[in-house]
Image (cartoon, coloured by chain):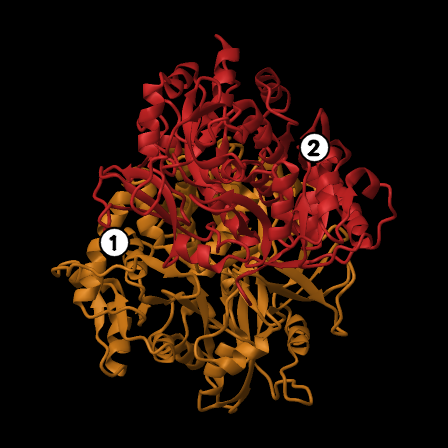
Chain colours: A red, B orange
Amino acid sequence: MDAQILPNFLQKRTFLTPDRPALSFLGKTYTFSEVYERAYTVAGQLQAAGLTRGQFAGVLLRNHEDTVFILLALQLIDVKAVILNNRLTAEELIWQMNDSTSAFFLTENSFDEVSQKVVNSLDEISAIHKEDLFRTDPAEPALVEEINLDEICTVMYTSGTTGNPKGVLQTYGNHWWSAVGSALNLGLNEKDSWLCAVPIFHISGYSILMRSIIYGMKMVLFESFHEKKAIDAISDEKVTIMSAVSTMLTRIADELKNDKLPEYFRCMLLGGGPAAKSLLEVCKEKGIPVYQTYGMTETSSQIVTLAPEYSLSKLGSAGKPLFPSHLKIAAPNGKHANPGEAGEILVKGPNVTKGYLNRQEETAKKMKDGWLLTGDIGYVDKEGFLYVLDRRSDLIISGGENIYPAEIEGVLVSHSQISDAGVIGMKDDVWGEVPVAFIAGDENLDKKEVIKYCLERLAKYKVPKKLIIINEIPRNASKKILRRKLRELLEESGN
Amino acid sequence: MDAQILPNFLQKRTFLTPDRPALSFLGKTYTFSEVYERAYTVAGQLQAAGLTRGQFAGVLLRNHEDTVFILLALQLIDVKAVILNNRLTAEELIWQMNDSTSAFFLTENSFDEVSQKVVNSLDEISAIHKEDLFRTDPAEPALVEEINLDEICTVMYTSGTTGNPKGVLQTYGNHWWSAVGSALNLGLNEKDSWLCAVPIFHISGYSILMRSIIYGMKMVLFESFHEKKAIDAISDEKVTIMSAVSTMLTRIADELKNDKLPEYFRCMLLGGGPAAKSLLEVCKEKGIPVYQTYGMTETSSQIVTLAPEYSLSKLGSAGKPLFPSHLKIAAPNGKHANPGEAGEILVKGPNVTKGYLNRQEETAKKMKDGWLLTGDIGYVDKEGFLYVLDRRSDLIISGGENIYPAEIEGVLVSHSQISDAGVIGMKDDVWGEVPVAFIAGDENLDKKEVIKYCLERLAKYKVPKKLIIINEIPRNASKKILRRKLRELLEESGN
């Protein structure tokens, strides 16, 4: 028996606990057998539309019950979902569709404007709108009854320090081990219910969907985050666990005022970059059980999380690597860092990606001897608790979204009047950070026009909130941008 | 990254939750770091004694804290434990030691009589008594920091319908997946504590040890089962889960009288063969949360267990196969059985053995296309719940111990005055079943002498409780014993 073969996750879960609640969306609750029934029908409709096993399909869908059915239908027929960020421009979407050689483009009417542009520029690919799809006659679907954990399940794009976004391969095994590693840390109760108010197109959201079917647990899905609705849902839906980023948690803590969350709410899983100590202390006062965590698309969500017994005594730490995973810190001299010594965070484990879609070279650069070089900086204390000091030196985290300067710089220098550009993050009270661009080029550069140019090519959250024109972008001998210098310039400019 | 590589289980668990209770024995509790420290020292002592990675070592030890330290020490240095049933005779032990090519024989003074005989008959192998071992100076052990799930962790012997006992290979992965499959069914709470009053040399006990280190959970270890002590420990040690066989559960239910087990006691995992409905009904009345389960050495414990929500409505069923595992019923015509139709139970999954030590041919007979042919008979109902009708047609289950007629028959026919023998089970109020032997041979056969002969060669529980002399053992054309005929003869004899 190959240890890598498991039963199809949704089929098995439905067989085991058909009557347990699986999904709640806008007040309507579906059991696992109801979810399965819907996914089964959609699987038949997708196969009737021509999707076949092993293909890649771009998926541009909002947080919605239909999206759950479609994503699970794709798993039932083993079509690999290239999950597209809802906020991308047509240009960005086209790039990812081409790069992933997606054979289909699944979307919905609300994205019509952007999806029209995508379809126009892609040969032989037509958009399948869910509204149309759901009206078609389903075929009797040929389901994949057993799944090899080594098979790709999803692809999500991230960017490196240079170059274009790369498709992170997430196998069924990556998702499985992530869910199991999390359960061995947080525990597992048949009454658990996980609130997903983060995008399902992010690994933070998609991983909740996977846990739901692996654990047999209800996912309470929100269209988008709203602090009051979140607090209400925790009561109404008996939510026990919620995933959040700092901005969300701040708003919940504010909204709570002197109220408390119910006793059964046992875990606020806080990801998306290091949290301010002040926020953690507020939560401690208000009795919100915050579990800091560290993870990324390449690790299929959490890889380091603070275990229950240390949530207060190790305030500010991201915790220890989950049971199946490994972590080490590489000192600047390349050796193992000593406790307390900062260096690059390296991770490995069965939840870690095997690489980037169709990019052997970039994969080889990021993966050494099975270790993923995260580019993030941190240290571990004597007891092995991780403290993340900085996400990858250049990474900007804005309201939980990762922003990669290289991507913005690429767009800026494609502008005919800009010769060079450098982007860094600037502190922001609401979003944590926002991007700021330094540009060099034509004297007559019109900032408003540059912003407009960016808006056409970049998701809005990536568009620089401030443009600063300088004579020359500071670079080192090997022409790498000196972001440290840019930060100094930003401070001098009064920000 | 190879998905099969995990951190060393005990090391990782100790790193994650050093201060959690890990083991309680005779009122003394050890944390994970204390257990690790002891296992670490023993690992050094074992290496100093000459044990090296990859070897097999016979282990004949009683349920005791020292046994836990030794078994975990063997994992730390990746020496494969051939775990020997405490009740075997010297002859049986010698057979298993030879068959497994064990390089060492770890035991304790209380087994001196039998172990002396073992050592005398084995070339170049001396017994290492734990009492001596613990007095030696430990080496600095070379620990195995990462473990390939495909590696063999333990070997336990079982017998087939014919021939000698075979060593079942249990990999680290088999144990891991078994523990994870169980957690996905029973849930997981950091306050869990599992009472092990079954032998640790059985998979039922050893699997509790594995769950303890994988979950970070306290194991309460008993030297042997005692109903009153079990009830007391459930209160004193805050036990939440206990593994039992029918005879144990009957005694607990009797002892409880009108008392109840505490609320937090959430699972009585009942294995070792189908339970009487009357017992299940008594437990239902007394509020003992019985989870029937079906498993065997080859599946590293449970493979089918009744999920919480069905424990009452499906009384008498063993449940559904755990998440990672598969089950099917082969009808007598070789096809898939229909719901309700009885046939042989086939299982597969990552918790299922890859075969028998050094026995390719026997492995090939029991494993077809990844499926293990259990030889047990059962059916599944329309919803997929398994009902086990009979363990393997010839198997005798006596107080939770499996007894294989072929083994007893082999000993009987080796007696100079016995020409043929056939063994079957006879109902017994205390043990469920006991073995009965039909023998054919010399007229002057002395039953007492035959029993003595058996006692020298077979563990006491395997020695026939009754000998019936007949002219000829009924066999079919292909010379297989007709056990059905023997049962008729037994009934005719008034049993």
- Camera-side residue of B172 and A427: A427
Left or right: residue A134 compared with residue B272: right
Rendered position, B90 above or below A14: below
Whole-angstrom CA distance, mark 2 to mark 1, is 51 Å
Q: Which residue is mark 2?
A: A64
**Which residue is situated farthest in the front direction here?**
A443
Whether residue A92 is visible: yes
Chain ID for label 2?
Answer: A
Report the amino acid beneath label 1. Answer: Ala
- Camera-side residue of A238 and A398: A398
Q: Which residue is mark 1?
A: B39
Q: Percent from the top left, x then y, of residue A466?
A: 47, 23
Tell me which corner region of the image, top left, top right, bottom left or bottom right, holds residue A316: top left
Please rate how many residues cluster around mark 1, counting C-alpha atoms within 10 Å: few if below 14, some from 14 to 19, many from 20: many
- Camera-side residue of B203 and B169: B169
Q: How many marks?
A: 2
Q: Percent from the top left, x then y, of residue A327?
A: 34, 47
Disc number for residue B3: none
Left or right: residue A415 compared with residue A383: right
Report the amino acid beneath label 2. Answer: His
Q: Give the structural element (helix, strand or loop) at label 2.
A: loop
Q: Are marks 2 and 1 on the same chain?
A: no
